[in-house]
Image: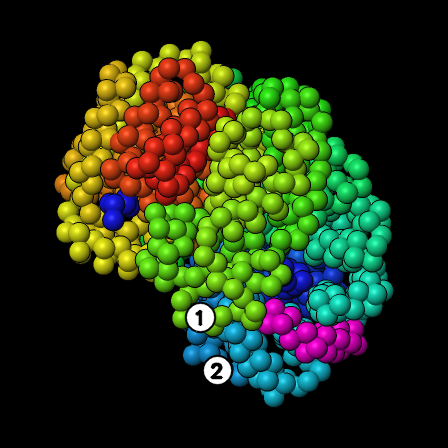
Amino acid sequence: MRHTRPARCCLRRCALLAAGVVLVSCGGLQRQAVERAAAMGQGGQHAAAETALRELMQPRQGAQQISADEALLLRSKLIPLLENQGRLGEALELAQQVHQQWKARRGERAPNTIAALGNLGRLYAAIGRLPQALQAQEQGMRLAIEVMGAWHEAAISARNNLAATYLGLQRVDDALRLQETALEASRRTLGATHLQTLVALSNLSRTYLAAGRLDDAVAAGAGAAQGLHEVAGAASPYALVARAHHVAALSARGDTAQALALQPALLAASRSVWGTQHRFTLEQLAVQARLQARSGRPAAALALAEGFIAGAEQVRSQPGLAAEDRRALFAAYADDYRFFSALHGAAGEPAPGFRLSELSKARTLLESMSQQSASRSSVLPEAERQRLQQLEQALHEHEKLISEGADARAREPLLLRRDAALREYEAVVTALKAQYPKFAQLRDPRIVAAADLPGLVPRGAVYIGYGLRGDHLFAWLVEHEGLPRYVDLGEIAHLAEAVEALRRATSHVRGLQGLLAAEGRRVWRLPDGSFRLRERAAPVPPGAVVVERESELIDHLGSRLLQPLAALIGGRRHWIVSPDGALAQLPFELLAFQGRRVLETIDLHYAQSLSVYAMARAQQLAYRGVARPKDLLALGNPAYEAAPADAARTRSQLRALPVHSEHQLREARLAWVPLPGTELEVQALRRVFPNSDAYLAREASEATLQRLNQQGALKDYRVLHFAVHGHLSTVDPALSSLVLSQADLAPGTDGYVTAAEWPGYELRSDLTILSACDTGLGPQVAGEGVLGLPFALFVAGNVNTVLSLWPVFDDVAPIFMEKFLARIKAGAGASKALADTKRELAAQPKTRHPAYWASFVLVGAG
């Protein structure tokens, strides 16, 4: 859409133990052998239990062969054993197969099918596919209650597992209600000392902690830990999880000494039961390190860093996981990486501290860029390259089909096919890496280390990499000489709200008055100097004073984010800023620094990390030796069919709706009002670059882009410009999209070019301009930053992207873009061209207000 004028929680992740329940056994199976294997698993001997079950599955001469149902039962029992060994990719593949096979053999309502669905849902939750977990577990709980009754053990277990997923989705009240119900049901039917009752009590401790009921959390955790110790043994995985919940509750309540007294024994037991690189062990490592640091023992905390990082990297890199799985797994560890990075920095150890900072940022983007670079390089024989690209294209098609699924149930078989295709692709890549070392080198993303830093940042520039842990902020700075420097910026209460308040206020020409009039929001300053953004009708925070001028926000953020860095950045005129968390939505050019607005003296652009910057910079240099016969491809004024009033209403509904699929986007085709002003924008750019191609109205379509890509012509353009509506998905970053023509749609197109689809295009562009609203926004994923269109364009081969942080003004955008690209044509670098254009508009009375120019930000190599 474009504009026309007028306290971090102390709750640890502590994964719930995999305890899959298979409800029906098969008579011919060696029951005693199965029970022995189950006892080994319950006692933490997961590898031994797996070996025992696999031996039962092997055909033996002279022995009665097991039936198909019995083999499927044994495979079902393998799933939690694989999961508890941290082999999530294998466990997921097996869980998918087992559920489909039970369903085909016995039907959806058979007890074993229901149990298999529960196993699958729990695997989805463990990996981080929470929407899929929610769908599977809600369906599984409904079926368990209908088929076996609300008081059956399987229905109680299903409630517990679903409650854990609710907790992961921040639905704390729903989780609490469900777990209290499950606990009461278990006590009434199984007794207070039954294993499942005590596991339910342990899980309830975790939910009490999330709800802020700290005393209840401590009591439940202690009771569950003691009971499970007596019932299942001290080394039982169930007892270990309960002890972890107890320690987490004590820590959150401030009983650090008591928590620290219990933690070493818990960590040692976890290493013994699960091994050093299991997720649970890693979580306990991080807990112990935090407790050590809080107790004033930073050296003891740092001694645990190396083991934690090695294990977390192993978990993240295991085979059989899709990119979103790796993102979700790593999101659970990203804050720990920042914690250890800051510890190293404070201890005067810049090399390991900076490395961990880089490891905590944009990993999936870096891997995706490396993957595309390797696949499109000439290091493979042509036949192998084509085979690999066909497999990658097939994966893109699977992703597109998944995004088009109407609901979670419709997407389930699509996900199964995607996961199978992913495993085939990974097998091919593994074989090619073994055969072609140069390909393996290109595929592995390069995380810049201290030794790589000299000369990486241009002379006269400085890299500022922020790290945010809750409200605690720190920064790593690197200059041309390559010495990383650490600065602790301290606690900044309600930082995200201050950033959002400034962004929203700046988007209105009338500033804070416009924010109140258009959005019904006010900004308040609290007695501690922090800021809160509140709805007009919301209660006034105690002691708060309403903020009348944006300068208060500008001064506050400048003093906290920039002024402490003045000694290191004051003499630099080019900043490469790598934001973190909410800072990704902040136009730093607006901030006050050394008595002036940053824009007045600084050329500034953004990068997801210094490693991503280095790769984008290398790509930028490589493109200089590649012939690209066309200067510009521009698409504008697409054929939209909505009347303005209808579009405003539909667009408002679309923003309020959690869009989970392209199916919903297609239903909103009347949300987009025509943009005749963008045709003027395209014409202005063609005056700057006569050697260009432009597509307007019905030709500004997805079909046009697909045709150019199929012809290989998209690689011919140095600059891509899209003067269209943009849709921001706040739920699924893969659905953020450019909205092209909605009229006369060609087969296989819907007019939305989503972030999921862009990696299927092949670009060699120095610059892509998304002259649409909110294209710089998107969901924040811990360890990755903002996902969405800029992420996808980098993967497709683009170097720099200009995005907007709020709606674009139709009467200003053509002027802005013409001036910007004229500077690009004259040879200016993208970051300087953008900064000079902003300075020019800021100096003119009609466009002085930042609402007209500050929304545009540049991400990439600069």
Left or right, 214 with reference to 121: right
Left or right, 835 with reference to 210: left
Residue carrying label 1: 538
Where's residue 167, x and y in %?
A: 55, 66
Q: Looking at the picture, which amino acid does disc 1 mark?
A: Ala
Q: Is 297 in the magenta?
A: no
Residue carrying label 2: 149
* 659 lies above or below 211: above
Left or right, 821 with reference to 289: left
Q: Looking at the picture, which amino acid does disc 2 mark?
A: Gly
Q: Which contiguous range is marked in magenta?
A: 209-231
The quarter of the picture where residue 259 lies is: bottom right
Where's residue 634, x and y in %?
A: 26, 28
Where's residue 91, x and y in %?
A: 58, 53
Q: Is 224 in the magenta?
A: yes
Q: Image point 39% across, 34% down: which residue?
A: 842
Q: Image point 69% across, 21% down: which residue?
A: 481
Separation (CA) of disc 2 from disc 1: 44 Å
Where's residue 10, x and y in %?
A: 67, 62
